Image (tube, rainbow, N blue to C red):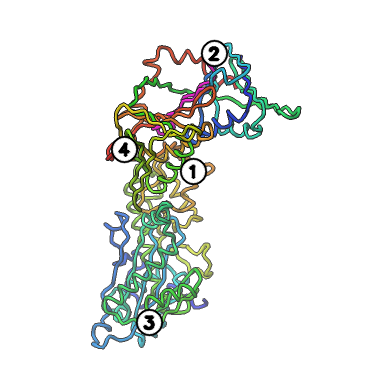
Amino acid sequence: MAESPTKDAQSQDLDIPLSATFIPPSITRPLLSSSTSYTHHSPHPPILTSSDDRPPCILGVDEAGRGPVLGPMVYAVAYTPLNSSHFLKSHSFDDSKKLTASFRSQLFHSTCTPSHDLHTHVGWSCTLLSARDISSGMLRPNTVGAYNLNAQAHDTTARLIREVIESGVNVAEIYVDTVGVATSYQAKLQKQFPGAKVTVAKKADSLYPIVSAASVVAKVTRDAAIEVLAEMEQEEEEKVEEDPEANGEDQNEAEKVEPAEDGKQKGKRTWDKVVEMGSGYPGDDKTKKWLKSNMDPVFGFGNRAVRFSWRTVADMMDGKGANAVGVEWEEDVDDGDQRITGFFTSGDSVGAGNGSWYGVPVKADSF
Amino acid sequence: MLEARLEQAAVLKKVVDAIKDLVQDCNFDCNDSGIQLQAMDNSHVALVAMHLKTDAFSPYRCDRNIALGINLASLQKVLRAAQNDDLLTLKAEDAPDVLNLVFESAENDRIAEYDIKLMDIDQEHLGIPDTEYAATVTMPSSEFQRICRDLNALSESVSIEAAKEGIKFSCQGDIGSGAVTLRQNNNVEKPDLSTIIELNEPVGLTFSLKYLVNFCKASSLSNTVKLSLSAEVPLLIEYKMESGYVRFYLAPKIGDDE
C-alpha cells in the first residue's frame, strides 16, 4: 500500500503525453454505441509466438464496474509466461485502485505499444458487458428466471479464459479476484479448467501482479468506455443539457489525480475527467446529477449507458419524490384477445338515456 | 334514499369475491329493480354484469336511482367484518358520499356499523343485445372450475367445442396437450350434477384461460353454471343466484381456433 507510485516517479519511462486520455484498443465505438456486449483479444505477445514449445503461462482475471449504475461491466484477463512474471512486479503493477488513473493508463498504453517490453510479454483480453445486457439479464421474467450479476460474472470469466486457451495459450495457472465466496467459485472454475491450477482469492489484485495487470486492463477500459459513452450521450442530449460546464471542460481537470490510498470502495474515485457522468457509482454526486438531467419523464433513459436493473434507477422513476410521469399499464392483451367493446355497443349511443336512468354519479366535491 | 336488507351477508360477500379480481372500482346502480352492476376489466376483454333483484332483499326501498361508486377492495375489507349469517343492511342517502353497512348478528344482539367512502366513477354502460346462442350448456360449477384450473396449467387458451353428445375443452401447451369431455347426462337424483346441452348447431371457440379461471371465483354463488356459446360472439357464463345472477362475458380469441 505504501508503494503507490506517484506521477513524477513513474512518468520518465513513459512516452505518452499526460494530457491525452488513452483510448485502448478494447474500445470499439460502434459496439458501445449499439449497447452490444463484446470481447476484445489482444494479439499473442511476441514472446509466446516466437517460441514453438508454447511456454506455460499464468493468467489473471479481474473486473471493473460491478457496482456502478452507469456503463458496462468489464472483465479482463492478462497472461504472461510463468518465467516472465517478475516483469510485472518491476513495472509496479498493483491493485488498480491503488494506482492513479494516469499511471494505469500509461501501463496499459505500454502494454499496447509494440516496442515496449510489457507488450512483448503480456497478452490480454477483455469483455464489456453492456448496461443493457446486464439489466435485461437481471430483469428476466420469472418464467425464465433472473440471470443475476454473479452468474453473469462467472459465465463471462469462464468464457474469457476458455477463449484464451482455445486461441492456443498454454494456461498453467489461473488467478481470479472475487467479491463473493472464494472456495465454491474456485471449485467451479477448477472443474471447467482441469488443466490449470486455479486460485480464487479476495483482493487477488494486490496479491498477484498478473491479476493487477488484468485489473489495469479492466479499469482503464471501463473508464474509457464511460468517457466515450458520456460523449455519445452528450452529443445526443445536447438540446436537453444546458450545463455550460459540459463543453467548457478543462483539460487540466483530467490530470487532477491523486493516488487513492484507501482500498475501500467508497470515495476511491478522484478522477475528474468525465464531468458529465462521474464514476457511475450511485453515490457519486456527478452520476446523480447526470442521471437526473438525462432522465426523460416518460421514457426514462436510453439503454446505452444506464443499468435499468439498479435500484437507483427504479427509485428515480417510481420511488418517493420521483419526477417521472406515472403510467397506468393496462393488463397485457394477449395475441388474439378481442375487446368486448367490439361486440357490445356503448349504452350512451344506443340504449336511450341509460346513463341518466341510473341516476347522477356522486360528485367529487361531495367529499 | 336506499335501504336494502339481505338475510345473509354471505350473498354480497360472495358476489364481491367473485368480481373483485376482475374489476377494481365500479358503480353499484340502485333502482327499483334492485342493485345492478356492469363493468369491464382493465383491458376491456371481459365484462361482468351482476343483478341482485329486489326479491333478494327484505325490505328493499329505493326512492331514486343512485349510483354507488365503490372500490371493491375496500368493500371486501368491510365485508370481512361480517359473519356469513349476519343480517346485512345497506343504506345510502339520495346524493350519498358514503355507503352505510350494518351487520346484525343472527344469534346475539351485536350490531356493527360501517361507512365506506364513495367515489365518482365515470363508467361506460354497454348495451348487451339479446342473443340466440348456438349452444347452451349447464354443468356443475365445481366441474367447470376444475377443468379451467387443470387446463390452465398447460396452456393460455382453451378451445371449447359443444356438440350433441357432449362438450369438449381442449388445449395445446408447450409441455403437451390436454382435453376434458363432459358427456350429456341427466342426473335425476342430483340435478346439480347434470350436464345438459341445448344445441341449435355445433360450435367451437377459443378463449383465454386466464379470464375463465378468474370467472370461476364465482363458483360459490351457485352449484351450476351456464355456458352460452355462438360463433363470433362473446361467451356468456352465468351463475344464477336465488334472486339474481352474476354474468361474465368474454370475447373469443381470434386466429388460433382449430
Above or below residue B162? Residue A115 is: below
Question: Residue A105 appears at what percent x and percent y?
Answer: 37, 69
Distance from the alpha carbon under mark 2 to that under mark 4: 40 Å
Is the same chain shared between marks 3 and 1?
yes
Distance from the alpha carbon under mark 4 to that under mark 1: 31 Å
User: What's the chain of the residue with tag 3?
Assistant: A
Question: Residue B122 appears at what percent x and percent y?
Answer: 47, 23
Which numbered mark, 4 or 1, is in the foreground of this view? 4
Distance from the alpha carbon under mark 1 to that under mark 2: 46 Å
Amino acid at the residue labelled 2 = Asp
Please report contact status of discs 2 and 4: CB closer than 8 Å, yes or no.
no
Q: Which residue is identified by label 1? A: A318
Which numbered mark, 4 or 3, is in the foreground of this view? 4
A267 with respect to B61 (left or right)? left
Q: Residue at x 41, y 68 (%)?
A: A154
**Magenta-colored stretch includes residue A198:** no
Is the same chain shared between marks 3 and 2?
no
Which numbered mark, 3 or 1, is in the foreground of this view? 3
Amino acid at the residue labelled 3 = Ala
**Magenta-colored stretch includes residue B50:** yes
Q: Secondary structure at mark 4?
A: loop
Q: Residue at x 49, y 38 (%)?
A: B142
Q: Which residue is identified by label 4? A: A336
Distance from the alpha carbon under mark 4 to that under mark 3: 55 Å
Quadrant housing the N terminus of chain B? top right
